Image: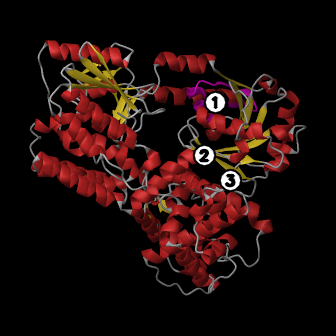
Amino acid sequence: MSDLVRVSVTDRIAVIRVANPPVNALSQGVRQGLSDAIETVDTSADIDAAIIVGDGRTFIAGADISEFGKPPQPPALPDVINRIEASMKPIVAVLHGTALGGGLEVALGAHYRVGLKGARVGLPEVTLGILPGAGGTQRMPRLVGVDAALDMITSGRHVPIAEAEKLGIVDTVSDEADPEAAGLAFAAKILADDRGVRRIRDMDPPAKDDAVLADWRAKVTKAARGQIAPPTCVDAVAAALSLPFEDGLAEERRLFKTLLDSPQREGLIHAFFSERKVAKLPELKGVEPRPVAKIGVIGGGTMGAGIAFCALLNELDVTLIERDQDAAAKAAGTISGLADGSVKRGKLTQEKRDALVGKSFRAVTDYAALSDVDLVVEAVFESMEVKQDVFTKLDAVCKPGAVLATNTSYLDIDEIAAMTSRPQDVIGLHFFSPAHIMKLLEVVVADKTAPEVVATGFALAKTLKKIAVRAGVCDGFIGNRMLAVYRAAADHMILDGASPYQIDKALVNFGFAMGPFAVSDLAGLDIGWATRKRRAATRDPRERVPTYADRICENGWFGQKTGRGYYKYEDGARKGTPDPEVEQIVAEERAKLGIEPRAFDDEEIVRRYMAAMINEAAKIVDEGIAKRPLDVDITLLSGYGFPRWRGGPMKYADMVGLDTVLSDIRTFAKEDDYFWRPARLLEDLVAKGSNFDSLNNED
């Protein structure tokens, strides 16, 4: 018997306990232990039934991620689950904490399932580019029906235990707090009622309805935007409806292995591991963050209100400072509106909403109200003078040890910190709008920022349920610096003959949620206009600077908020239509510059856009603005709409081949050797035959 699985007997009921902390992952030892335990149950005359429970805080949370990418070791999980199901004695799985992926598939192999309050179940394999490959696609539709099964399998969502009971995934939800007590009570009742075994494999599958399956394929294909795993999940469930169980298992396994070998799975696995590694920085080992219970927010506009509401939702006390009483009242109204919306969506109870807004939040005008806060986030107008004035005031009123954070998107944090007597307490916390929804938080470390202040930034991100990425100080940090460059590549293509609508379409087909010009319309073209004006004085004369965007702004076309930008938004529509007048403005600029437009195909658009992105990212890593390539990947995945299944721009470059990317850059440099200057790091890695991923494990 494996040390990771222990068997004891109580009143002729075996307790099979999985003990592989912290999440009881299905390692080889656990798989072998489960198989051996069932053999013991079946061959012992002293055992009439068995329960499977997880030690600690959860049942089985899924596969052992440390085994990802390694040769599989027997016994295979499908074989273990089939062995559980084949037992001649009733087997009960007791689900507490989480039962996800292979953990839920183990439970489906048992004959009965008991849930504990607060548990969640799910089959999230699709988020890793694969499908449930141990019988999940074959057993789940037999148990809950086609629609419920496909909803779970194609979304990967976690299902609360009360919903799982309604669907029939679990037989009952116990009031017991202890999994073993709940399982023993249920198993005793099964034996008393002489109910015997009940195998899902023996249940009749739902009738196959080709129209229903076609609707599901169409729906998930549209939502997946290029991902192959969701529609493949539909194919696997379809096999459950039309094939004998064993044949269905074989087809599921075939489809699983096809996905396992796909580059999409590689990209999604990279994203999965990178999200877990991004906050693990050598500089923070052994460094304790400062405690944060009360925060201040300076500015109650869209960004400031979003930051304040995000903090409130995560049970922090918030004091918001505005310039006058009218602005403070408006900010309070914004917070109330956001809270009311959360109540309507079922995210907050009315009682919780009233407590947050009434007791944990205040909007005032006097900086003295910040005297006891642990951390302040400044979110005022993007002006160095304005921000320096704010930090001068904060330095005067905030207690010693309070963290002073700026939400600037571009400005030099060292200059801001120099306005205080405590630059070691100053850091950048670059939130993304809307701040209560967007996951990314760039933690920008200035020259004199203390390590415990950096640790506090990462701890705050965890409290706010955000993904934090460490960045150094430069114009735009990681994300916005890259954005400026790959957006410039798009502008250059427009000057040379492409249309904004063709570029957007090509990049949406690549996997982006939106193209760059639709994104500009959503954010507001006036933001980019202000940035271009700010940079005009330092611009190199060799830089190609398209002015058509300025002409669009001069017309007052700032995007969705004005009903017109690169696209037209008729009658308040959220989706725009191409605007011939924009194309005329572009054509006039080409003529003024003497440019003869040429045709671009979608492949060239993607190659140029991605080459610009990857090249700038390599410079950012080489300069130490990003510590590792994975920091760039997580920034683009979490804040800039990069398709997750491609793993991020650095992972994408590795999969395409760095030599291919460098060759493209050198080809494009024949037209513009100022813009297309290869990054030194990219050239070095190609010369060594290495890749970006090789740098992710360096301390």
Q: Amino acid at mark 1?
A: Lys
The residue that label 1 is drawn on is 330
* Label 1 close to label 3 by CB (< 8 Å): no
- Judge whether 173 appears above or below 411 on screen: above
Q: Nearer the viewer, residue 409 or 544?
A: 409
Camera-nearest label, 1 or 3 = 3
Along the polypeptide, which appears first: circle 3 or circle 2?
2
Circle 3 packing at 10 Å, graded few (<14), some (14-19), many (20+), is: few
What kind of element bears circle 2?
A: loop
Write the residue at 68% across / 62% down. Answer: 620
Quadrant of residue 528 in the image? bottom right
Write the residue at 49% across / 52% down. Answer: 271
Quadrant of residue 60 in the image? top left
Q: Amino acid at mark 3?
A: Asp
Along the polypeptide, which appears first: circle 2 or circle 1?
1
* Label 2 close to label 1 by CB (< 8 Å): no
Along the polypeptide, which appears first: circle 1 or circle 3?
1
Q: Nearer the viewer, residue 567 or 272?
A: 272
What kind of element bears circle 3?
A: loop
Circle 1 packing at 10 Å, graded few (<14), some (14-19), many (20+), is: some
The residue that label 2 is drawn on is 432
Camera-nearest label, 2 or 1 = 2
Residue range highlighted in magenta: 307-327
The residue that label 3 is drawn on is 699
Using the rendered image of the protein, determine whether residue 421 is visible from the camera's viewpoint: yes
What kind of element bears circle 1?
A: helix
Magenta segment: does it hold 665? no
Q: Amino acid at mark 2?
A: Phe
